[in-house]
Image: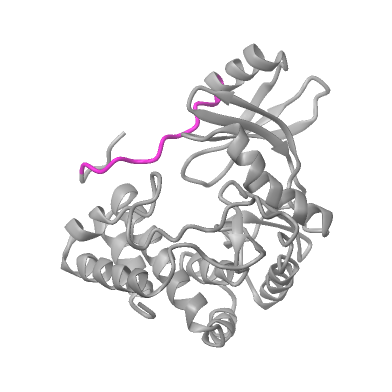
Amino acid sequence: MTSPQGWARAERLDAVRMVAALRARTGVRLELDGPCPGGQVGAAYVRGPDGGRSVLKWRPHSLVADLRAGPLAVVDALRSAGCPAPATELIAQVGHAVVMVQELLPGTEIDRFDQRFLEQALALNRLQAGRLADRPGVPAVELHLRADGAGYCLHEPLRQHNRRSAALERRIAAVGADFPGRLAGQDAVHMDFQPGNLLAAEGSITGVVDWDGAARGDRRFDLVTLRFGLHAKEPGPGVVQRLDAVLDALPEDVLRPAWAHMSLRMADWAIRHFGPADVEHWLDLAEQRV
């Protein structure tokens, strides 16, 4: 699949085909119960033999062993510490993709991210500190500041889109030349810690979902991700200012590479999946700190 600009786009979940493939491989019969809202790759609600509702997900161009050693190990460590992350109920290799059935957590996506939710998000982020100290096999966060990631964080779209994005890519590469390619640390890192992946009910965060890219590193990376996530929303009064103050206090060797990574990730994704106005929207934020 390609974008109007000719760039490759993300492969989306074919839920019907994946449900059939899971039954063929595991013998488990699932019934589709509609698509999950949001997301670029897709997820669907399913019901198992007992009628219980779960979430069907896939991760293209992945291996079960890699997910068990990486993201699922991160989730296991955090669930043991009390983080409301979903359990994985079923996992199977289907061609080049990993297909998972995960626990459906209570709550719904947060409509308006206010100070109350920011405080809870900061507390959840602190819970991630040091959680992987006894799990040395979990891979570290790769920043992709000098070379492309696997289907995301691509540099060439920025180089070719327009002069402004090309200038941003040069600054991102310069940050990559100044810092290591992997994020140091023993913390759990979600990698997409933003309001769309936080569930809440009655004013309390009840779930943190979409841990498919989770890795080892510095938990404060997720606060930069949260700042980018808020740029796509209309948060409550003072939320952005409060979070910016938290980011201002981060050490340079965390803030600069994390901000450069998110700038690359969001600008590249917008170029390949959305329109020019969306690209400018992300460039506006990226240029604040790169």
Q: Is residue 14 magenta?
A: yes
Residue lying at 66% horizontally and 74% vertically, measured from the top left: 118
Instruction: Judge by depth and name the residue closer to the eye, 117 or 219.
Output: 219
Q: Where is residue 178 in the image (x, y as percent from the top left)?
A: 37, 75
Instruction: Judge by depth and name the residue closer to the eye, 40 or 36.
Output: 40
Is residue 84 something one can see in this rendering?
no
Residue lying at 70% horizontally and 47% vertically, measured from the top left: 73
Q: Main secondary structure of the magenta part?
A: loop
Is residue 209 something one can see in this rendering?
yes
Residue lying at 59% horizontally and 76% vertically, measured from the top left: 236
Image mark count:
0
Is residue 230 shown left or right of residue 157?
Answer: right
Quarter occupied by the C terminus: bottom left
Residue lying at 83% horizontally and 58% vertically, measured from the top left: 82
The image shows residue 238, relative to residue 12, as above or below, that is below
Q: Position of residue 288 (x, y in %)?
A: 37, 80
Q: Is residue 160 magenta?
A: no
Q: Position of residue 95 (x, y in %)?
A: 50, 22
Quadrant of res 67: top right
Is residue 232 shown left or right of residue 212?
Answer: left
Is residue 263 shown left or right of residue 253?
Answer: left
The image shows residue 100, relative to residue 173, as above or below, that is above
Q: Where is residue 129 in the image (x, y as percent from the top left)?
A: 71, 69
Quarter occupied by the N terminus: top left
Colour mode of the rendering = one colour
Quadrant of res 282: bottom left
Numbered range of the magenta stretch:
6-16
The image shows residue 76, relative to residue 200, as above or below, that is above
